[in-house]
Image: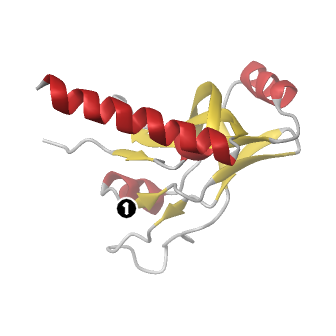
Amino acid sequence: MEKEINIKNRKASYEYALLDTYIAGIQLKGTEIKSIREGKAAIGDAFCYFEKGELFVKGLHITEYGKASFYNHTPLRDRKLLLQKKELRKIANAFTDGMAIVPLKLFINEGGWAKLQISLAKGKKQYDKRETIKKRELQRNLGRHIK
């Protein structure tokens, strides 16, 4: 039985107000997918950017595969995201100043392909972050009293 790979960016919902979400494929090398299947990846510092009409992810750390020899990959290289052209145009048109494209979750789908859930996001102000903390603590306290 394979363990389910589900690597999340927990900071994203705290730092940003998430608007639209998309599921994108990732262009990977052989040793990268093997490391992801072992769960050795981190997306906490990752972000997406456009270059020549294509979307790339930067800062996605995939640890080198232990059983590979000199064919190993670079852990922090930029990786191309695979989306349909109409989705790329929709993201590019909605992308303005003060916005970011943030990776939310890295997972492997039923077909065995690595996918990255990304979101168009707007940065939160400090008072919005405090409001998020208050709501979370209120929900936690309500959950304690109900049980």
Q: Amino acid at mark 1?
A: Lys
Give the residue at x 70% y 47%: 48
Whole-percent x and y of residue 90? 79, 21
Q: Which of the 4 quarters of the picture holds residue 65?
A: bottom left
Tell me the SS state at disc 1: loop
Indicate left or right for 27 with 66 as reference. right
Give the residue at x 52% y 56%: 44
- Relative to 85, is 47 above or below? below
Q: Which of the 4 quarters of the picture holds residue 85?
A: top right
- The reply to whether residue 115 is visible in this rendering is no
Total number of numbered labels?
1
Whole-percent x and y of residue 56? 71, 48
Indicate left or right for 90 with 128 as reference. right
The front one of 7 and 98 is 98
- Name the quarter where the N terminus is drawn: top left
- Name the quarter where the C terminus is drawn: top left
Indicate left or right for 8 with 59 as reference. left
- The reply to whether residue 141 is visible in this rendering is yes
The front one of 56 and 102 is 102
Give the residue at x 22% y 28%: 143
Whole-percent x and y of residue 59? 62, 61
**Residue that carries the numbered disc 1 in the rendered image:** 40
Tell me how the rendering is colored. secondary structure
- Relative to 44, is 87 above or below? above
- Relative to 66, is 12 above or below? above
Give the residue at x 21% y 45%: 3
- Graded by Cα atoms within 10 Å as few (under 14), some (14 to 19) or many (20 or more), the crowding at tag 1 reads some
Whole-percent x and y of residue 63? 44, 68
